[in-house]
Image (tube, rainbow, N blue to C red):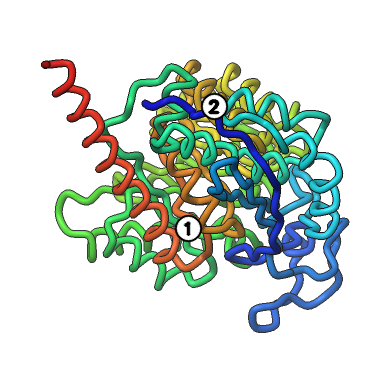
Amino acid sequence: MTAGNNLTISDVLLAPAQGAFFYDDQLAIREGVASDGFVYKGKPRTPGFTAIRMPAEALSVGLKLSDGAIVWGDMMSVQYAGAGGRDPVFKGEAIADLTRRSVAPRLKGLPVDSFRDACAASLTGGLPLAVSYGVSQALLQAVAHAHRCTMAEIVCREFDLPIPDKGVPLYAQSGDQRQVNVDKMILRRIDVLPHGLINSREKFGPKGESFLEFATWVARRVRELGGGGYRPTLHFDVYGWIGLEIGLSPADVAAFIAKAADHVGGLQLSIESPADYGSTDLQLERYAEIVGCLRKLGSPARIAVDEYCNTLDDIERFAKARAAHAIQIKTPDVGSFVDIVQGVRHCKAHGVGAFVGGSCVETDLSARVTTHVAVATQAEMMLAKPGMGVDEGVSIVGNEQNRLLAILNTARHDKQKEDFR
């Protein structure tokens, strides 16, 4: 790895951007509002929303370096902003004003030799997580540019990680076009599928009947289209509907999940967000009980936590308590990529799966940066993002991963030749 050439940041640029999907008011949708084509009828319930479904706004931040190069990062919220203890929905003008006033002055003149040092110097003072997320993307790319290497190699160097020699399993999400998108996932032999967007009573069904039918159909479709040897993990996000429909008792939640595992033909089943207990403390306590109940039942099914496990501190608490089999490190909710890396490390240290996720409302740029970090840390799986169309996210993340591995393999081969000499 070459020296950083004493590069500094000479200017900060801002440009309006668009996320790849829409911000949705989860509270209003959970209450059963009617849909009208692609939009929802009724008034929003979550503060900051002007409609139940709004186009995803984002903001690009560019760092002009002293050698004339410009690197970028993208800021945004997540699809269900303002729910589950998350930051409010993204407002581009307000974030741009804050960035100009409070962040740009810290960035100008900043050296970009060390990623962690640059983040520590600029991302302080309780900034919105979206700002930390976008700026840290740009800083990671700036440091990689300064050292003429990949972002993954910077992460490995600064966090004392080995250079990876293998990829990370991809997890695709279906959106509302579930049947068509499940077929796409199977034809592409995606490692983890389908998400399913089980975010309403209609999709979950009385006592979970609609969900169980869908899970059974997905497993059957895997057998029909997948061919021999293809055994993906079936990972469903149920947005708390097991708790809402079956009941909040951890024993009852676990019993339903174990029942669901019997419907998927021996494939590994993972349920994300089985219940919503309303706070981080209660979520941690009850999820740990669900894990214990599944163990007592002898069920191979796993649960993953998302809501109320947002920040690095939350991730560390859930990992230490083993209050889930896997934790979604929902990247815009964590903020700085320094914290995202540390989140994966906390999960690994406590034997909990690290799912480097994110949101459909992100951008191609944030997805590519996330790919480097997920590969460098060797997460359990990573989300194919952005968007809800399957093909786009799989193409962006999958291709970035394959290009990265080709570069890392070449770098490793070159180093081996140098060592031999």
Q: Amino acid at mark 2?
A: Asp
Residue 234 placement (x, y as % from top left): 39, 49
Outermost residue, left direction? Answer: 421
Residue occupying image coordinates x 59% and y 42%:
65
Residue 122 placement (x, y as % from top left): 73, 31
Residue occupying image coordinates x 38% and y 65%:
182
Q: Is 246 left or right of 211, judged from the image as shown?
A: right
Q: Residues within 10 Å of mark 1 (few under 14, many from 20)?
A: many
Residue in front for this viewpoint, 90 or 159: 159
Numbered-mark total = 2
Residue 91 versus residue 64 in the image, above or below: below
Q: Residues within 10 Å of mark 2 (few under 14, many from 20)?
A: many
Residue 229's disc is: none
Q: Amino acid at mark 1?
A: Gln
Mark 2 element type: loop
Say whether marks 2 and 1 touch (CB < 8 Å). no
Residue occupying image coordinates x 70% and y 34%:
109
Residue placed under numbered mark 1 in the picture: 173
Residue 175 versus residue 9 in the image, above or below: below
Mark 1 element type: loop
Residue 42 placement (x, y as % from top left): 83, 75
Q: Is residue 326 visible?
A: yes
Q: Quadrant of residue 309?
A: top right
Residue occupying image coordinates x 40% and y 36%:
148
Disc 2 to disc 1, C-alpha distance: 37 Å
Residue in front for this viewpoint, 123 or 321: 123
Residue placed under numbered mark 2 in the picture: 113
Q: Is 418 left or right of 255, judged from the image as shown?
A: left
Residue 189 placement (x, y as % from top left): 27, 56
Q: Is 185 left or right of 370, judged from the image as shown?
A: left
Q: Quadrant of the C terminus?
A: top left
Q: Quadrant of the N terminus?
A: top left
